[in-house]
Image: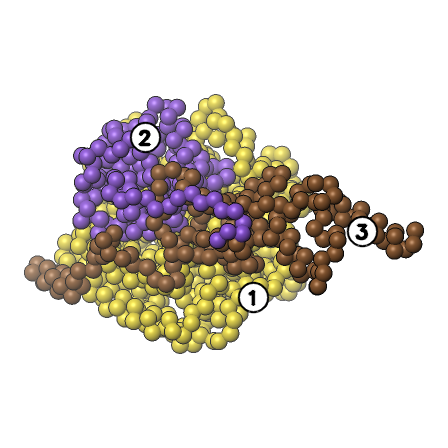
Amino acid sequence: MVKPILKLITVAKEAGVVTRKYPYDSPLLTEEFRGKIEIDASICWGCGACVKACPSNALTIRESMDVRELVYFAGRCIFCGRCADVCPTGAIKVTKEFELATEELEDLEQVVIHRKVKCPICGKHFVPQPLGRYVCEKCAKGGVPTYMMVCPECRRKVGVKKMIRCKGG
Amino acid sequence: MNQHKDPLPERLRPIESLIREWLWIDRGRTIMLDVKRENLVEVARGLYKEIGAFFKTCAGVDERPLWGGYAVHHIFGIDEEGLDVVVYVRIPEKDYPWVPSIVREVPAADWCELEFRDLLGIDPRGRLTQRLVLPDDWPEEVKPLRKDVPYGYRPPRAEETKPAEVGMYPSGVPVGPYHPALHEPEYFELYVEGEEVVDVRYRGFHVHRGIEKLAESPRFDYNKVTFLAERICGICGFVHSCAYVMAVERAGKVEVPERAEYIRALLLEVERLHSHLLWLGVAAHLLGYDAGFMHAWRVREKTMILAEYLTGSRKTYGMNLVGGVRKDITPEKVPKILKVLEEVAKGTKKVADMIVSVPQVRKRLEGTGVLRKSDAAALSVVGPVARASGLNRDVRKDYPYLAYKDVSFKVPVYSEGDNLSRTLVRVEEIFESIEIIKQLLDRMPPGEVLNEEWDIEPGRYAVTSVEAPRGEDTHLLITGVGRPYRWRVRAPTYANIPALRPMLRGQELADAPITIASIDPCFSCTDRMLVIDVRTGKRSVLVTRPQVKVVSLG
Amino acid sequence: MRTPRALKRSIWVFHLNTGSCNACDIEILDVLAPFMDAERFGVKLVASPRHADVALLTGPITRETLPKVVNALRAMPRPRLVLAIGACAVSGGIWHDSYSVIGGFPRLKKILEENGVVIDRVVYVPGCPARPEAIIYGLAVLVGLLKKKVRKEVKEAGER
């Protein structure tokens, strides 16, 4: 009867005090921890790759006539980090933030608003501005042809007109 | 389906006359037998009783888009050869499909048959049936897993609720669904005669979340389902994720770099450490020894911190993708891993020694909840429950997968079959896991860890098994276009529940809780989910009515 | 409503699992284990909702547990405080549109109000699973000891 108590006392003494006095002490985090994500609005293109990769639809896109909004709702996030893996520009960074308790659900939202490019011919909005600029730079190789920042329907019409003119018709 | 026409294995000769056709899905590992519906019961009897295979699971599949009907797949396994045998039965009727029930020959098939009856509407004839999986107020006509029912469709409440169980005795002791002893919502009523438990009325499946239907929905694709699989169970989640990803890779013939296989095996062993230490603490708590609970969880915390250091999250690691893993274990992490393993080994030795040496604890563990070897073999139990009753069964040795073929380890087997042997099996497995991790770290080959170029054809088939801390976890996968066509999960606790009947017969009520906890029920897994089981089970016995009926029938 | 002064000290909690995968539940038990000892704040796990101040709710509410959850919450005496832990409880998580799931505490709150059960204060703790430190932080915010940190952010593309 005495021996088990002695064993318990030995084990307890060796272990000592292991309690961390959080929140008056730092939490037990390692450097690999995946917390909330941070979207850098200056680099984001609004392409939607993160929306396709998110398993729980925490990242969604709200489209309206002239604006595309990228909405991140941390309440549905599963903190997997796939969005940061697939983002082509590296705008999404995984932080170590885990103190996310709140009473209103709106506090958990992060919205990035992209204005869309307006077609000079028909006036329709069609693509977020940063994405349009990137495509122009990649395809133009030195000069922006007249029909790059034009919406797809008008581009088709303008292109055909140009072809007809070149052919000499 | 991918197939090779090769000779039938010797073991299967006794039933050769009953098979219409056989196809090798995966050479040496999985064979599919196409059987006519009228021969099904004979084939099941031949496999289970004469050949000595044991039953893994069964799955109903809605194959109407493929050839116009339903089908049922029964999966058996022959341990000695590492061979999975799939018995495939086609059902010609489009409306009101039915199959003969094999429950009299194979008692372990009880719940899977009720499940495909609930979710697909295939009627198993020749047995008593009842609702098992779906909520009480679900309308009878809506079968969720059929392909024409959209995945998010929520029918309104049915006019009359159909309770899943009808009580036989007029009164009983109700326990649950929210009870101080339970960590999970379940409901049961116990009927006792004096100190002995006689019968129980059980209603589980409170955790049914519709995982198999979600995996087939347009919202998911192959890579996203790994995150879904991990959240089947929070304690053994990585096991389900690995089994799913291995099934996709086997079916789609995807090349996986060897280093990724080693990393997966290593994380599986880290998960085994945390799970067994968790069980040790909970078992001590159930026996009244709370100091043991606290110390076991103190040692366990180090494994959680190690998991976070390696993967980025304490639980639900999120490391698996089709074709490999997302993060590498760089050489500078290795000294820290070895240091944590040292501390865990020393800590476990002291804590386990302390818990088992308390005379009150030892007396309650020794000689209670005995499961004889013959019962264990007849009921096809898996995991530490089987190993404590003298059956030498371990998926890592019998059906080798991942990096386990390159490491050497012992499989602890005891023959008494009581609660103490189950405890000792788990404690020894902790030390074996630590040895395995050290060997894996030594032998890890260099190279990359993720192969992102793959293309998976639809219509391929795979069956995988992985050794979870609780036993053998089996997944069946049929690939579709961009996402699985049918995915079936059978968790280990599902196979261990029938073993509670012989274990509890004649037991006193006070011994019941630790006996139930000794099979290490993981309610969430079983109820994928299929069945919800009692986790701590302080005042509950899990002898369910379907089992009572089945065994009393034959 | 602001938390009454009587509730600023020892909080008695009741663990209510509405069909979760158990990762958040073992993190709740971890809060009581030696490393993150919550008993130094006087937090105690009680057996019955009738003795509880706060209900720790985990899991997307499944269809089968719905009537039972309503009964359990009705049995709590006023003021009723709820801490919704984990991505599943906050919004349904990865299961938010499955056929067998109600979809998180906000939808449950509407159903509770229809049945006459008033919840006085709710705090949401995201995470999958929620860390033990996050649960302690959430409990402190619920009781009024700490202030919340997150805020809604709306940014125009192009600004940092």
Report which residue position mark 3 lands on: A159
| Badge 3 amino acid | Gly
At 58% from the left and 63% from the top, the residue drawn is: B452
| Residue depicted at 60% across the width and 39% down the height | A64
* Real-space Cα separation, disc 1 to disc 3, in angstroms: 41 Å
**Tag 3's secondary structure?**
helix
- Nearest to the eye among marks 3 and 2: give it: 3
Left or right? Give the position of B20 relative to B520.
right
Mark 1 neighbour density, 10 Å: few (under 14) some (14–19) many (20 or more): some
* Chain A display color: brown
Q: Which chain is mark 3 on?
A: A
Numbered label attached to residue C119: 2
Please state which of residues B451 and B31 is positioned toward the viewer in this rendering: B451
Image location of residue A54, percent across then percent down: 52, 50
Contact flag, marks 1 and 3 (Cβ < 8 Å): no
Q: CA distance from mark 2 to mark 1?
A: 50 Å
Q: Position of residue B55 (x, y in %)?
A: 47, 53
**Residue A38 at least partly seen:** yes
Chain B colour as displayed: yellow
Q: Tell me if residue B311 comes above or below residue A73 in the rendering.
A: below
Question: Chain for mark 2?
Answer: C
Give the residue at mark 1.
B451
- Of badges 1 and 3, the one in the foreground is 3
Q: Secondary structure at mark 1?
A: loop
- Taking C8 as reference, is B335 above or below it? below
Q: Residue at x 47, y 37 (%)?
A: C100
What crowding class fits label 2: few (fewer than 14 Cα within 10 Å), some (14-19), or many (20 or more)? some
Tell me the kind of residue under disc 2. Ile
Q: Residue C117 sits in which quadrant? A: top left
Rendered position, B246 above or below C125? below
